[in-house]
Image (cartoon, rainbow, N blue to C red):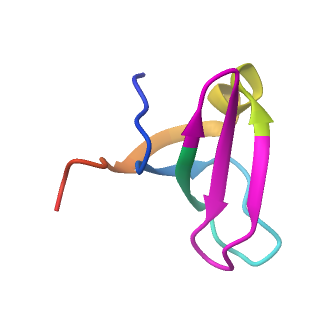
Amino acid sequence: MEYKIGDIVRTKKQHPCGSKLWEITRIGVDFKLKCQGCGHVVTLEREKAKKIITKIEKRADEN
């Protein structure tokens, strides 16, 4: 899958706040994800991030 900054993605496990939706804020060697429930920011290695992301809920270029 191709990911872009600003995409909203769903993960396999939920964050402790209860949300499974994350916004991609950085793409490179690492992915930086921002929780859509509480705003917490995490940085994950590219391979780990690709494993936990199940689908893209909303593309960055959609309104």
- The correct choice, above or below, for 39 with respect to 12 in the image is below
- The correct choice, above or below, for 36 with respect to 62 in the image is below
State the image quarter where residue 20 is shown.
bottom right
State the image quarter where residue 1 is shown.
top left
Give the residue drawn at x 70%, y 21%.
Answer: 29
Give the residue drawn at x 41%, y 43%.
Answer: 56
The magenta region covers 26-43
Q: Provide residue 42's location: percent of width, then percent of height.
A: 78, 52
**Residue situated furthest left in the rendering:** 63
Give the residue drawn at x 30%, y 47%.
Answer: 59
Identify the main secondary structure in magenta. strand
Total number of numbered discs in the rendering: 0
Q: Is residue 58 magenta?
A: no
Q: Provide residue 4's location: percent of width, then percent of height.
A: 40, 36
Q: Horizontal placement of 3 versus 14: left or right?
A: left
Q: Horizontal placement of 6 versus 36: left or right?
A: left
- Quick one: 39 or 20, which is closer to the camera? 39
Q: Provide residue 11's location: percent of width, then percent of height.
A: 62, 48
- Quick one: 45 or 15, which is closer to the camera? 45
Q: Is residue 41 magenta?
A: yes
- Quick one: 54 or 9, which is closer to the camera? 9
Q: Quadrant of the C terminus?
A: bottom left
- The correct choice, above or below, for 36 with respect to 33 in the image is below
